[in-house]
Each structure stands twice: as structure tokens, then as C-alpha cells.
Image (cartoon, rainbow, N blue to C red):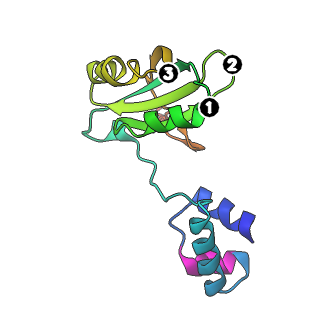
Amino acid sequence: MKEELLQLLAKDARRSIIDLAVMLDVSEDDVINEMEKLEKEKVICGYQTLINWDKTERETITALIEVKVNTQKGRGFDSIAERIYKFKEVKAVYLMSGGFDFTVIVEEKTMKEVALFVSNKLAPLESVLSTATCFVMKRYKDHGIIIDGPKVDKRMIVTP
């Protein structure tokens, strides 16, 4: 039941306990107990809504910052990641393979605010060797959901 429940919640976290119980062919109490267990184990870390901010009045810019670090003896990547993810500007931190160590995702109102975050908070960290910032220009798909798909021409065809 665990995997099926997680799959259902990943697709739509708004499903009711009743619907989940019916879909999984278990009792509502079983669903509640399993969800509480998964939350306690930090398998389920939260419930969020995916919003297309481009369709609102809110002005934001998302930056992906590649970060190279120098790990210190006795302190691995986890302690550096913790210092980074504690900044309020940081939305996500991922340990990477390849040419850099972390991807840090930041959302701010302007490119200048992102630049100030990088120059005043991120780059000065003792372990940070270098950063490279890329800005998201447009989202097409996010968290498995198509945000901005093909435009459908709804005009009526008129022929003589």
C-alpha cells in the first residue's frame, strides 16, 4: 500500500482520505495511519501546490546557481549544504555529480536581488570556491506537470 499511496499523493495531494481508501481498497483508518507513519519517517515531507506564477501579478525570477565547494576535513557536503539551505532566499539545494558540487535554486523579485544574494551571502562562505548563475527564462514543465503547453487555435474556420 505504501508505494501506491505515495504515487497517488505525488499526482494529486488534494485527494481525500475517503478517495484514497477507495482507490487502495483499504479502510480510511489504514490510510490515515500510513500517512502519519510516512510523515513521521520524513518520507512525506510536505504538501505543496504547483502554481504558475507567470499567470499572476507576482513578479519573480528563478535562478539556478552552480556551486563548487572545498570540503573541509571532518566536514562533508552535508554541513555545507545545511549552511546554504538555511538562507531564506534558497528554495532548494541538490548535491550534484559532474563539474560542480551543488545546484542552489533561488527565487527573488529581480536579477539584482539574486546577484546580491550570491555576492553577499553565498560566495563569501568559507567553503565556496566558485559560483555560476543561470536564470530560468520560461517554465514548460515542472514537477511532471506541463505548465505552458502548445497553444490551441480556437478561431472558427471560415471558408467561402
Residue at 49 percent of width and 21 percent of height: 127
Instruction: Name the mark nearer the viewer: 1 or 2.
Output: 1
- Report the Cα–Cα distance between label 1 and label 2: 23 Å
- How far is mark 3 from mark 1, CA to CA? 13 Å
Q: Secondary structure at mark 3?
A: loop
Mark 3: amino acid: Ser
Q: Is residue 54 above or below residue 130?
A: below
Mark 1 residue type: Gly
At mark 2, the secondary structure is loop
Whichever of labels 3 and 1 marks the residue nearer the N terminus, that label is 1
Task: Count the labels in the image.
Answer: 3
Q: What's drawn in magenta, residue-wise?
A: 16-23
Please name whichever residue, 70 or 27, is drawn nearer the observer in this view of the structure: 70
- Residue 68 x, y percent position in the rendering: 55, 17
Quarter of the rendering containing residue 78:
top right
Residue type of the residue flagged with mark 2 = Gly
3 vs 1, front mark: 1
Residue corresponding to mark 3: 127
Q: Are marks 1 and 2 in contact (CB under 8 Å)?
A: no
**Residue 22 is one of the magenta-drawn residues:** yes
Can you see residue 105? Answer: yes
- Mark 2, other Cα within 10 Å: few <14 / some 14–19 / many ≥20: few
Rendered view: 17 above or below 52: below
Q: Where does label 2 land, which residue?
A: 98
Q: Which mark is residue 63?
A: none
Earlier-in-chain disc, 3 versus 2: 2
- Image coordinates for residue 32, horizontal then vertical, percent: 59, 79
**What residue lies at 29% left-to-right and 41% top-to-bottom?**
56
**Which of 149/132 is in front?**
132
148 and 109: which is toward the camera: 109
Q: Position of residue 31 (x, y in %)?
A: 63, 78
Give the residue pinned by disc 1. 74
